[in-house]
Image (spheres, rainbow, N blue to C red):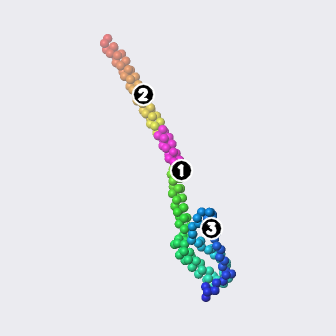
Amino acid sequence: MFWDTPNPANRQTVVKKSRIPISSAKQYRRSPSPTKVVRRTPKSINDLREQVVARKFYYLWQKKVFGTILKSMRQYYNQHLMQKHFNIWKNEWWETRKEWRLMIRAEYHYNLHLLASTFHTWKQYITVELIDTGKYLKAKRFGKDIYIFIMKTNSYFLV
């Protein structure tokens, strides 16, 4: 079988170096990081099958040794976590910046509308007052004319 005879020409093992700087402090024992397998292009169908099976068992081994969360699962989780918090930040930004501008614009428009409607109402009031004053003056003049007429006619009747 193909798994009995490993072919070293198709696989190379590279040991990862630690990113943690070495210091004079007491060194704690860490679990070993998984080895990274550099894959080459398969030359035959058996090589392809061997790579597929090796990859399958590599992931199973990685899951057993390093916990239940695989790197792809962690990346997926982190991506969705970032997306969720970005949307929260975007909504907060919208409320504090854009919505504030829109509220200022709406208040300005509303105040302008109030001033215009107040001015229009005041103009109507002045017009009505002028008409009423004109009617009053006309009535007063008419009353004066009537009074003068009556006074003239009474003087004729007295003679």
In this rendered view, identify the residue nearer to me: 107 or 35.
Answer: 35
Tags 3 and 1 in contact by the CB under 8 Å rule?
no
Q: Which mark is residue 98?
A: 1
In this rendered view, identify the residue nearer to me: 39 or 65.
Answer: 65
Image spot of residue 45 (x, y percent): 64, 84
| Viewer-side label of 2, 1 | 1
Please say whether residue 120 is visible from this viewpoint: no
**Label 3: which residue?**
18
Please say whether residue 110 is visible from this viewpoint: yes
Image spot of residue 103 (x, y percent): 50, 47
Q: Secondary structure at mark 3?
A: loop
Q: What residue is at 61 percent from the left and 88 percent from the top?
A: 1
Q: Secondary structure at mark 1?
A: helix
Image spot of residue 93 (x, y percent): 53, 53
| Viewer-side label of 3, 1 | 3
Q: Secondary structure at mark 2?
A: helix
Disc 2/disc 1 C-alpha distance (Å): 54 Å
Type of amino acid under label 1: Lys
Asked if residue 112 lies in the magenta stretch, the reply is yes
Query: Which circle's residue, 3 or 1, is located before the other in the chain?
Result: 3
Q: Residues within 10 Å of mark 3 (few under 14, many from 20)?
A: few
**Label 2: which residue?**
134
Asked if residue 61 lies in the magenta stretch, the reply is no
Type of amino acid under label 3: Ser
Query: Which circle's residue, 2 or 1, is located before the other in the chain?
Result: 1
Q: Is residue 9 left or right of residue 147?
A: right
Disc 3/disc 1 C-alpha distance (Å): 46 Å
Region rendered in magenta: 100-116
Numbered marks: total: 3
Q: What residue is at 43 percent from the left and 29 percent from the top?
A: 130
